[in-house]
Image: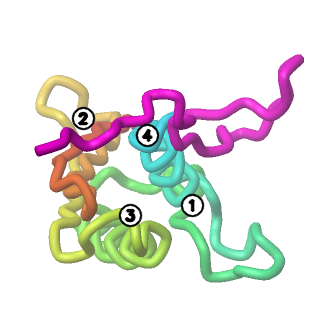
Amino acid sequence: MSKPVVNSTLPRVSYMAFPFRMERDGATTVARFEHIRQQVEQVLFTSPGERVFRPEFGFGARRHVFEPNATSLWEYAQNRLYGALAEALTGEVDPKTIQVSVGAPPDAPEVLLVRIRYVIAALQKEEIHEIEV
């Protein structure tokens, strides 16, 4: 019985980094997990209407900086972020596993803490990101 041949010279799959930047060898690339994390950040920090051909894309965290840090903002943010992430991460993340929680940490009530959890569909690997706004 023969063993399967494994070609270790195959290139690793990589994605263009965001923000786009060039190096001597070409465009900067990142691994899959970093690429998905960058997509999450794009959704979070891109304001709706900022992209010409996708005006509905994004959450726009910057515009909420001066809003009162209260339950009504948290509920709006959770619903809006869930929808935006489910659309932006289609094909990479199982949409049923996306969980978004928004609130203020007990030790820093002036901070909006966004916690995003999902499972990468092809690998069944869970990722969690906590981002302070």
Q: Which residue is mark 4?
A: 133
Out of 86 and 71, give the one closest to the viewer. Answer: 86
Residue in view at x 57 percent, y 60 percent? 60
Task: List the residue tagged with mark 3.
Answer: 92
**Which SS class for mark 4?**
loop
Q: Nearer the viewer, mark 4 or mark 2?
A: 4
Q: What residue did someone put label 2 on?
A: 109
User: In the picture shown, does residue 94 fall above or below 37?
Assistant: below
What secondary structure predominates along the stretch shown in magenta?
loop
What is the distance, in whole Å, between disc 4 and disc 2 at their CAs? 12 Å
Q: Where does residue 111 sit, x and y in percent of width and height?
A: 34, 35
- Disc 2: CA contacts within 10 A as few (<14), some (14-19) or many (>=20): few
Looking at this view, name the residue that lies furthest to the top.
24
Using the numbered discs, state the Cα–Cα distance from disc 1 to disc 2 in whole angstroms. 20 Å
How far separated are the C-alphas under marks 4 and 3? 25 Å
Q: Name which of mark 3 and mark 1 comes first in the sequence.
A: 1
User: Which residue is tagged 1?
Assistant: 60
Are discs 4 and 1 less than 8 Å apart at CB?
no
Please identify the quarter of the rendering in which residue 124 is found: bottom left
